[in-house]
Image (tube, rainbow, N blue to C red):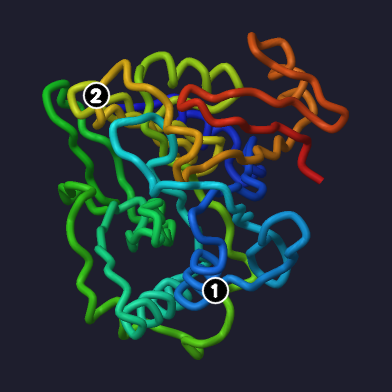
């Protein structure tokens, strides 16, 4: 099976991806507790505390925490399913795994073939993934129309949901577990719960993302941005269809920024329904009910 995202990746090989992520904004029930969670367990550093708490690497802000939630994250609604923090290499992935285990954080380890993942939740139940992208291990998607098939670079079948061997991953650690997260860590992707899979795909395709998987039988889809890793936006309907947005008083994602590599993508977004033109970009509401801004990358 060939996808638009794979086609785009081949056409733009070596070029910057069309979009990257700026900071995301999370509303939490307890600002001090959330700050401690992100800094102690994941190694993010406090960069600013004038408008909420800005956390990230030594070089850039990844997450802005703000008070205001009265209740934890709620199921049965659209909104963020998880945010993925991307790490640059295997050594950093294994180092963070060691750090999380040392601090007795509840995690799960999954081999997606395209990436290795550590899943966890913050104290409010907001989903977090630590992702090490490994697109070089991917070979192809299967051709079956009845089931999801994935094959590695050697032609071996893979479920994309296999467990990682913790002992092996831990053996690849590099660096002191207490140092801050790597400077080139990023927001790698966002995974949303939506009410209508097809409408959400069409929305992000309208912005310039390239559709990749569309698996309505699994309630799952994703889109790429031009790179060999074709999973920059993920979508699911696992909570059902026609569900409402997350309550405004709940812990949730309240905003995020997309940085477009070309000004034409910002101009394209300005023509879409619901676009609000700002001095430095475009503001919109995504299919999950979350506000976001598109700006031209610096």
Looking at marks 1 and 2 on the same chain, the residue that comes earlier in the sequence is marked by 1
The outermost residue toward the right is 279
For label 2, the crowd category at 10 Å Cα-Cα, with few meaning under 14, some 14 to 19 and many 20 or more, is: some
Label 2 sits on residue: 240
Left or right, 278 with reference to 75: right
In the foreground, 132 or 151: 132
Q: Which image quarter: residue 217?
A: top left
Label 1 packing within 10 angstroms: few (<14), some (14-19), many (20+): some
- Whether residue 12 sits left or right of residue 250 in the image: it is right
Where the N terminus falls, by quadrant? Answer: top left
Question: In the figure, 283 relative to 270: above or below?
Answer: below
At 62% from the left and 57% from the top, the residue drawn is: 62
Identify which residue, 169 or 105, lies in the foreground.
105
Q: Nearer the viewer, residue 249 or 4?
A: 249
Image position, residue 241 (x, y; %):
28, 19
Whether 182 is drawn above or below 83: the answer is below
Judge whether 182 appears above or below 8 on screen: below
Q: Residue at x 31, y 85 (%)?
A: 171
Q: What secondary structure is marked by label 2?
A: loop
Residue at the spot 65% in from the left edge and 69% down from the top edge: 57
Q: Please state the horizontal and vertical placement of residue 290, each as a whole percent of the image.
A: 54, 31
SS under mark 1? helix
Mark linked to residue 39: 1
Marks 1/2: CA–CA distance? 34 Å
Q: Could you tell me residue 209's position as x and y percent? A: 54, 27
At a point 43% along the width and 26% down the height, the residue shown is 245
Residue 288 vs residue 48: left or right?
left
């Amino acid at each position: 099976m060939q996808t638009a995202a794979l086609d785009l990746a081949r056409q733009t090989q070596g070029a910057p991806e069309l979009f990257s992520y700026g900071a995301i904004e999370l509303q939490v029930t307890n600002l001090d507790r959330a700050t401690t969670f992100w800094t102690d367990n994941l190694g993010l550093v406090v960069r600013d505390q004038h408008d909420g708490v800005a956390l990230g690497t030594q070089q850039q802000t990844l997450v802005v925490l703000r008070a205001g939630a009265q209740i934890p994250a709620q199921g049965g609604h659209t909104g963020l399913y998880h945010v993925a923090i991307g790490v640059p290499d295997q050594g950093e992935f294994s180092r963070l795994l060691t750090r999380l285990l040392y601090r007795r954080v509840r995690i799960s380890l999954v081999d997606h073939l395209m990436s290795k993942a550590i899943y966890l939740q913050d104290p409010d139940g907001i989903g977090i993934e630590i992702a090490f992208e490994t697109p070089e291990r991917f070979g192809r998607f299967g051709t079956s129309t009845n089931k999801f098939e994935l094959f590695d670079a050697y032609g071996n079948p893979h479920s994309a949901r296999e467990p990682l061997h913790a002992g092996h991953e831990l053996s690849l650690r590099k660096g002191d577990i207490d140092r801050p997260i790597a400077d080139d860590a990023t927001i790698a992707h966002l995974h949303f719960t939506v009410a209508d899979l097809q409408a959400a795909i069409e929305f992000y395709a309208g912005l310039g993302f390239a559709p990749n998987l569309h698996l309505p039988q699994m309630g799952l889809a994703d889109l790429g941005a031009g790179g060999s890793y074709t999973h920059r936006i993920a979508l699911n309907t696992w909570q059902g269809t026609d569900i409402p947005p997350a309550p405004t008083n709940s812990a949730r994602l309240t905003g995020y920024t997309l940085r477009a590599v070309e000004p034409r993508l910002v101009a394209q977004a300005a023509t879409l329904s619901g676009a609000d033109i700002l001095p430095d970009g475009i503001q919109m509401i995504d299919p999950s009910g979350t506000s976001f801004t598109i700006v031209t990358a610096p």
